[in-house]
Structures are given as structure tokens and as C-alpha cells.
Image: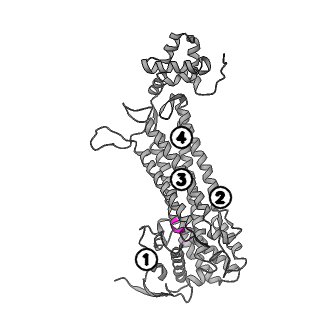
Amino acid sequence: MTKMRIEHDSLGEVAVPEDAYYGVQTHRALDNFHISGIPLSHYPRMINALAYIKMAAAEANASLGLLDEDKCRAICRACEDILDGKLHDQFVVDVIQGGAGTSANMNANEVICNRALELLGHARGEYQHLHPLNHVNMSQSTNDVYPSALNIALIMDIRELVDAMEYLRKAFRRKGEEFADVIKMGRTQLQDAVPMTLGQEFSAWAVTIGEDIQRMDEAQALVHEINMGATAIGTGLNCHPDYARTVTEKLVQLTTLQLVSSPDLVEATQDTGAYVQLSGVLKRAAVKLSKICNDLRLLSSGPRCGVNEINLPPMQPGSSIMPGKVNPVIPEVVNQVAFTVVGHDMTVTMACEAGQLELNVMEPVIGYSLFQSMNMLRRACLTLADKCVLGITANRERCREMVEHSIGLVTALNPYIGYEKSAEIAKEAMKTGGSVYEIVLEKGYLSREELDDILKPENMVKPRYVHRP
């Protein structure tokens, strides 16, 4: 039988496991929220962010003469244990919870308090010596602690995601350089358009990922604004006039992040616009990454009956019934990540819209959705780079063959023989199966020397001055 200790709150007494660092309110949340099955411990950066905030709050309160120095030191040492990776298994509440994150805040208060009590020489639960609310939560409310911790954790996750996106961008750029001399047919609406190089195609994907990295940096800047000192609704009730400034300074020192206090704490406590912006950028990156994966699947389709311009590295057998079949499994899984991110964006949108009056109580599901999107996107970028992009090879002969037999070559003739004659040649080539080159010569529209120069694929992949007759 597990030994229990009795704790109480405003609703009554509850038996808590004797060896648990969490307390009564965390235990109630364990009973109430069997939702996602994912405990707060699944997100160590959120736990560390809560520890940073509790440490900064203790130091701020002590410097303002509100908290005894011995209690402050014990709280800070307990927070340091958490930052060292200890006690994370004690953060047991479900990440999706009612109460605007109160259960997560209380989980942190109780774990830190009970560890601090041990450090002071007392037993867990002896709150007459150090109290989770009176001391660990001094000058705070869930309504400034939870969103500020969420912002700190998000900043750390954003940085890691950006690193993964940069790694993928470099992988595409490297392939762009490798394929710079591979002539192929560009397509619009899945129809032949005009020639380009395979290098241009891959380099364009590198550029588009680079643009999303810039948007991520912009979104990250918004998340640096926190509302510590707001307490319940932004008025700062129950905290020292200098507390908001002091606790923010302490947080900057502890985290080395360029955090800033919101100029209007009432507005900051109810506004979740930064999360809408961040989620939108994540969706943008996911949508564009999914489009790139669609292209990779198309370009590698075949091997005999598809486009077959590139080869994706074979990762695993593709069928339980068709021997030798190899599927584009890496682009496929990235597509599915993108669909998930788009769904999370809708969740964030609805949750942010659901805020009422001075608070948005839906922040737990906002945080969960953002963490999931960023973690999945980060893994998807690394997986796509390492297990797909860096191993791609070009089918050079196949690419050039399709250029030389494409009707799209007539586009290059427009400046020389006009649109109507070019269209006439295209129709005849389609009807007879003949080549554009031979038909132009037969009709005497241009000389062989002129045609060789105009239809040279290398001359059609960049701007070129044309002297019109």
C-alpha cells in the first residue's frame, strides 16, 4: 500500500502520496483532467520556464523586502534542481486543462515548495513553514505566470525549429548548386511550359524556406513581451509597485532572453494576438513545405511511367504485394505533418477568439497546439533533409530528352516569328508527333543557325536580349 499524507485546500482534505512532491491541488487536477494523456513533464521547456519564473519572483520579492531571505534561497535552490532536470516527473497534470493553466501553476508551486521544505529541514506538506501560495506564488497569479512561462518556452522551441529549417534550406541550396547544369522542362498547371535547370528548381525551394525563417524571426519577436506583474487581470493587485519591473529584470538575467514587460498589462493579460501570429507563420511554413514535398513526389514519379526526373533515396520497401516498389515515404510523412499543423492552427485560432473580457482561459490548448506544431515541424525538416533531400540524384538524360521533345520550346520563338506562327507550329507538332525544330526548318521561318541559337536550352533559362524584327 502506498503511504499517504493528508493535505487540504479550500474545498477540503485530500490524501496525497507521501513521496510525491506535488500536493492537493495537483492531485485534484490529476483526477479531473484525463484528456490528452500527455502530462506537463512531456514539455521540459515549459517546466523550466515555470522554474525560471518562480526563481525570478522569489528574488524580486526578496529584493523588495517581501520575502524572507532563507525562504527565497530555498525556493531558488528548488528551482535550480528543476533546471538541472530533476523533479520533472512530478509535473503530472494534463497539458490540456480547465482553469487557464491554474493546475500547471499550482503543480509548479507545490513541487517547488515541497522540495524547498526539504532543503529547509522540514517534511513535505508542512506548509506552515513555507507555503505554495503565500510564498512560492507571492505577487503572482496564474494569469501572468502561465502566459509568461509559455512565451519563454515558445522562444526556446522557435530557436530550435529555426535551426532545423536552416539545415533544410542549406540542403536544398546544396542540391541547387549540384544540379545547376541539369536542363529540364518547367511546368505550369502540369503542362509543359519553358526550360529551366533542375538547380533553379531546388534553389527556389531553398529561397522559400529562407523566407519562412524570416517570418519565424518576426513572430518570435512578439513572444518576447510578457505580462509578469499583471497578477489577475493586469492591474497588479497584491504586488509591489516595483515588482513588474524587478521580476522582468530578474527573468532577463536568468534566461538571457531579451524579455520586455508589456506597456499595458491589462491588454497583455487578455490579448493572445502573438499566438495567432506565430501559429499563422507555422501554418505558412507547413503549407509551403508540403507543396515542396508534392513536387518531389511528382518529379520522382515512375520509375518507368512517370516524370522520373529525379531519384529519391530508397528508404524502405513500398508494398506488401508489389515486389520492388519503393514509395516516397519521407515526403509523404512531411505532408502529413503539414496537415496536422494546419489543424493545430485552426485550434489556436478558435481558442484565441474564445477569450472573454479580461482573460483568455484557453491558453493550455493554445500552448499544446503550438508546441506540437513546432516539434513536429522541426523533426519533419531534419528528416526531410537527412533522409531525402541530401540523397536525391538527377536523371540528367531523361531531363534533357523531355526538353528536346517538348512543345514548350515554341515559346522561345515568339519574339522571332510571332505568336500565331508559333501556335501553328505547336499544333502541328502535337498532331504529327514531329519536333518543333524540324517543323520550323521545313516551313522556312528561320535558318538552322538561328534555330540552333534560339532553341539552345541553356539560352532559355535566364533573361536574354532579343532583337525583334
Read off the magenta span: 354-365
User: Residue 374, percent across and down?
Assistant: 52, 56
Q: Nearer the viewer, mark 2 or mark 4?
A: 2
| Residue at x 48% of width, y 53% of height | 379
Give the class, few, some or many, for how many residues have Cα within 10 Å of label 3's Cα (few <14, many ≥20).
Answer: many
Q: Amino acid at mark 2?
A: Ala
CA distance for labels 2 and 1: 36 Å
Q: Quadrant of residue 305?
A: top left
Which label was assigned to residue 283? 3
CA distance for labels 2 and 4: 27 Å
Callout 4–callout 1 Cβ contact below 8 Å: no
| Residue at x 69% of width, y 76% of height | 243
Q: Which residue is mark 2?
A: 221
- Quadrant where the image shows the N terminus: bottom left
Residue projecting furthest to the left: 321
CA distance for labels 3 and 2: 18 Å
